[in-house]
């Protein structure tokens, strides 16, 4: 399965861990949410660009249906 995710500016406590909420779709078009506590890049990658992009605010607000939260 492939999932394309987009970062949001929403932060939440998920299972006792501070996480950033990501939203996206599977390759078959199913909407998903991911609660990501950690993310890393290889040491050889341009970490400054990655960090800057990670901190950018998304253009649209996030609305998570309550049934999606565990």
Image (cartoon, helix red, strand yellow):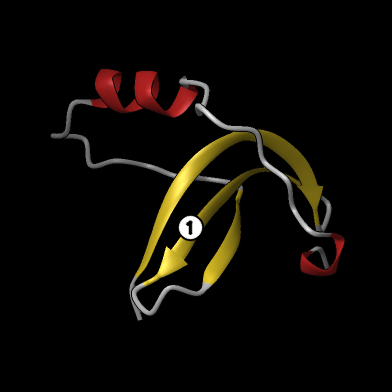
Q: Nearer the viewer, residue 24 or 15?
A: 24
> Residue 68's spot in the image, x, y percent?
77, 66
Q: Mark 1 falls on what kind of element?
A: strand
Image quarter in which the C terminus is found: bottom right
Q: Quadrant of residue 41?
A: top left
Q: Residue at x 55, y 67 (%)?
A: 31
Q: Along the horizontal axis of the image, is 51 left or right of 48?
A: right
Q: Residue at x 50, y 74 (%)?
A: 30
Q: Residue at x 43, y 53 (%)?
A: 5
Q: Residue at x 86, y 60 (%)?
A: 66
Residue found at the very far left of the displayed protein = 44
User: Dot 1, crowdedness within 10 Å: few (<14), some or many (≥20)?
Assistant: some
> Residue 17's spot in the image, x, y percent?
76, 48
> Residue 29's spot in the image, x, y percent?
43, 73
> Residue 3's spot in the image, x, y percent?
39, 67
Q: Along the horizontal axis of the image, is 31 left or right of 56?
A: right
Relative height, residue 48 to residue 24 (above, below): above
Q: Which residue is mark 1?
A: 24
């Amino acid at each position: 399965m492939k999932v394309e995710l987009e970062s949001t500016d929403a932060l939440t406590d998920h299972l006792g861990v501070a996480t950033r909420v990501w939203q996206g779709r599977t390759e078959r078009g199913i909407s998903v949410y991911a609660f990501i506590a950690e993310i890393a890049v290889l040491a050889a990658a341009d970490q400054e660009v990655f960090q800057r992009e990670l901190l950018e605010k998304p253009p649209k607000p996030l609305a998570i249906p309550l049934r999606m939260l565990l």
